[in-house]
């Protein structure tokens, strides 16, 4: 908590720093279409789908990450129940429907709004986004950040573009001024990934949450991404020692 208070102070000091130029598009990859084939498709995305379908009662086999006949049967049952095309192919429409059912509605979206200058601070190691109102914490949200091999970039950036995207990027997209890559804050069709190190470097939020933040920020809003002391995202945050 003491470390976070120090970081909040740093944010206020650098609030009026100039951002750097942005890249044009997000570097996050699109979701692949999962379908029955020989040999069966496999991977972490299949495991995530099996877990969610099992939690919902559609799938009863082991979580093995293979898109096999048992998984396809569960997907077809899910598609049939939700009024989708029953083809056993797990594409964007099926992904989005599963995400829609997973998402929880947020009550009183307009009950509170920041009144001063809005800025954002993202604690990558804690998977947390904090909205600042005139430099003071206003509201926090859980997020997913980059995997260890594709980490979320640490630094001070600005929002350079806002848009309403779909499919893998969820309902909203806010581009960051990262000069060496293409990153942003966006929603997701994988809400179960929130709170984990799961992305290609972007910051994922629940769609209901990103829609709130989207309304509060504007172009040139400051976004400060920091890591955790002695964690995997520590660049620029080494502890001070005597003589530093």
Image (cartoon, grey):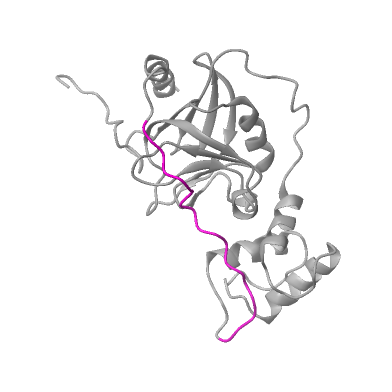
Q: Quadrant of the N terminus?
A: top left
State whether residue 37 is above or below residue 207.
below
Which residues make up the magenta segment? 20-38
Give the x, y percent position of residue 120.
50, 27
Q: Is residue 130 shown in magenta? A: no
Compared to residue 9, the image places residue 237 above or below, namely below
Given residues 169 and 218, the one toward you in this image is: 218
Q: At 37% across and 54% down in the image, what residue appears?
A: 149
The x, y position of residue 195, in whole percent, is 55, 44
57 relative to 52 in the view: left or right: right
Quarter holding the C terminus is top left
Residue furthest left as drawn: 243
Q: Is 30 part of what is drawn in magenta?
A: yes
Q: Position of residue 90 (x, y in %)?
A: 67, 68
Nearest the eye: 115 or 129: 115
Left or right of 13: which side holds 28?
right
């Amino acid at each position: 908590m003491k470390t976070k208070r120090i970081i909040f102070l740093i944010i206020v000091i650098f609030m009026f720093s100039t951002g750097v130029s942005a890249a044009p598009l997000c570097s996050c990859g699109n979701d692949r279409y999962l379908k029955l084939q020989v040999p069966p498709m496999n991977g972490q995305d299949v495991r995530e789908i099996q877990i969610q379908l099992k939690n919902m009662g559609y799938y009863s086999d082991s979580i093995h990450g293979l898109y096999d006949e048992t998984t396809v049967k569960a997907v077809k049952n899910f598609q049939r129940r939700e009024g989708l095309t029953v083809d056993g192919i797990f594409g964007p429409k099926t992904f989005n429907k599963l995400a829609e059912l997973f998402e929880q509605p947020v009550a009183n979206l307009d009950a509170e709004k920041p009144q001063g200058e809005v800025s954002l601070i993202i604690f990558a190691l804690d998977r947390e986004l904090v909205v600042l109102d005139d430099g003071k914490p206003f509201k926090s949200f859980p997020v997913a950040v980059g995997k260890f091999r594709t980490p979320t970039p640490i630094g001070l950036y600005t929002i350079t573009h806002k848009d309403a995207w779909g499919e893998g990027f969820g309902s909203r997209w806010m581009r960051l001024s990262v000069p060496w890559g293409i990153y942003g804050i966006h929603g997701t069709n994988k809400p179960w990934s929130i709170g984990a190190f799961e992305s290609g470097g972007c910051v994922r939020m629940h769609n209901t949450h990103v829609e709130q933040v989207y309304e509060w920020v504007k172009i040139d809003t400051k976004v400060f991404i920091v890591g955790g002391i002695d964690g995997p995202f520590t660049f620029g945050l080494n502890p001070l020692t005597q003589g530093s």
